Amino acid sequence: MDEPSCFSSRSLLIAAGATALCCIYALWALRSNAEGVFRRPRKKKRCGCSCSCGVAGSSGGGDCDARSGDGDMAVTDNKVGTAERQAGGSMMEQLVPEITTHALSYLDYTSLCRLSMTNSAMRRAANDDGAWKALYHKDFTVEQDTVNPSNGWKAYYAATKAIVNVNAEFYNIIRERSLPAMSRFWLNADYVKCIHASGELFTGYSAVIDSWALLFNWGQGGGQGIDFQIRDVRARILGGVAWVTMNAYVDIDSGPFHVTNIYELHDGRWHMVHHHSSVMLH
C-alpha cells in the first residue's frame, strides 16, 4: 500500500520539476529572441554605390547594405503574400464552375463584393453572372428567371437593391408623416398619379402632394397610415423605369392592400411617378 503512494508522490515531483524547467527555458528563449540571439546575422555586401556620404564603397556603403537587406526582407514578404493569394486563386480556378457558383451563392451581397477585391481569380469568380443571378433569386425573387439584363446580373442586382431601398424610404416617410420629404420624393411633373386606398384619383404634382397633406393630417387624428407592414416586395427595372408591387398590412378595419409603385430615374435619382393602393379581396 505504501509503495504505490511513494511512487505517485515521486512521479508528481518529477513532473513538477520538468514543468518548471520547461517554463524557465521558455522564458529564456523569449528573452534571447528579444535581444536578437536567435536572429540570423546578415551578411553585408558592398553595393559600390554612392550613398548619402558621397563616397563609393565607404562606410556609407555599409548603411546602404543594411537598408538593402531590409528591402530584401520586404520583397520576400511581398512574394510570400502574393504566392498565398495566387494559391487561393488557383484553388478557385480548379473548381468546377457549377460548384463555384453554388458555393458563392451562400455569400451575401457585401461578402461577394469583398471577395471580388482579393485577387484576379477571385474577382473573376465573384463577378460571375451565374453567382449574381443565384444571389438575386435568393434575396429577391425567382419570377425573373428568364430575364437577361443588358449589363449583367451584378448590375441588375445593385439596381434592384437600390430601388427596394427607395421604396422602403417611401413608407418611412408615411410613418413619420413628413410632408416636405414626400414633396421631394415625388417627381414634379403633371403626369404623376396617386390612387389612395379610398379609390380617389389625384393627377398632377400639386394635387398629389395636397392629397398626402390631407392624409397626414387625418393620420394625426388616429386614422390610417401609421402602424403597417410591407411584405412580398417584388421589383422590376427596365432602363430608367422601375415598378414595385407589394402587400401592405395596415392596422385598420379595411384589411390589407395591394400596392403598386412606379419610379422614374432622373439625374441619377429615383422619383415616384405613380402610387396605387387597393383593398385586397378575401
Image (spheres, rainbow, N blue to C red):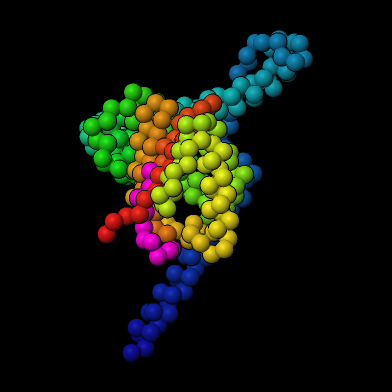
Question: In the rendered image, is residue 74 in sight?
Answer: yes
Work out whether residue 152 or residue 171 is closer to the camera in this orientation and state it: 171
Res. 115 image quadrant:
top left
Q: Is residue 227 above or below residue 200?
A: below
Q: Residue at x 58, y 60 (%)?
A: 220
Q: Residue at x 39, y 26 (%)?
A: 239
User: Is residue 252 located in the magenta-colored stretch of the structure?
Assistant: yes
Q: 260 left or right of 47?
A: left
Q: 224 left or right of 98?
A: right
Work out whether residue 129 or residue 107 is closer to the camera in this orientation and state it: 129
Question: In which quadrant will I find the N terminus?
Answer: bottom left
Q: Is residue 134 above or below residue 89?
A: below
Q: Residue at x 48, y 37 (%)?
A: 203
Question: In which quadrant will I find the C terminus?
Answer: bottom left
Q: Position of residue 136 (x, y in %)?
A: 33, 39
Question: In the rendered image, is residue 164 in sight?
Answer: no
User: Is residue 262 located in the magenta-colored stretch of the structure?
Assistant: no
Q: Position of residue 98 (x, y in %)?
A: 22, 34
Q: 167 left or right of 53?
A: left
Q: Position of residue 171 (x, y in %)?
A: 49, 50
Q: Residue at x 27, y 36 (%)?
A: 144
Work out whether residue 7 or residue 81 is closer to the camera in this orientation and state it: 81
Res. 43 image quadrant:
top right
Q: What secondary structure do most residues of the magenta stretch adopt?
A: loop
Q: Residue furthest right?
A: 53
Q: Position of residue 95 (x, y in %)?
A: 25, 33
Q: How many marks?
A: 0
Q: Residue furthest bottom?
A: 1
Res. 207 image quadrant:
top right
Instruction: Give the magenta-colored segment's residue range.
Output: 251-260
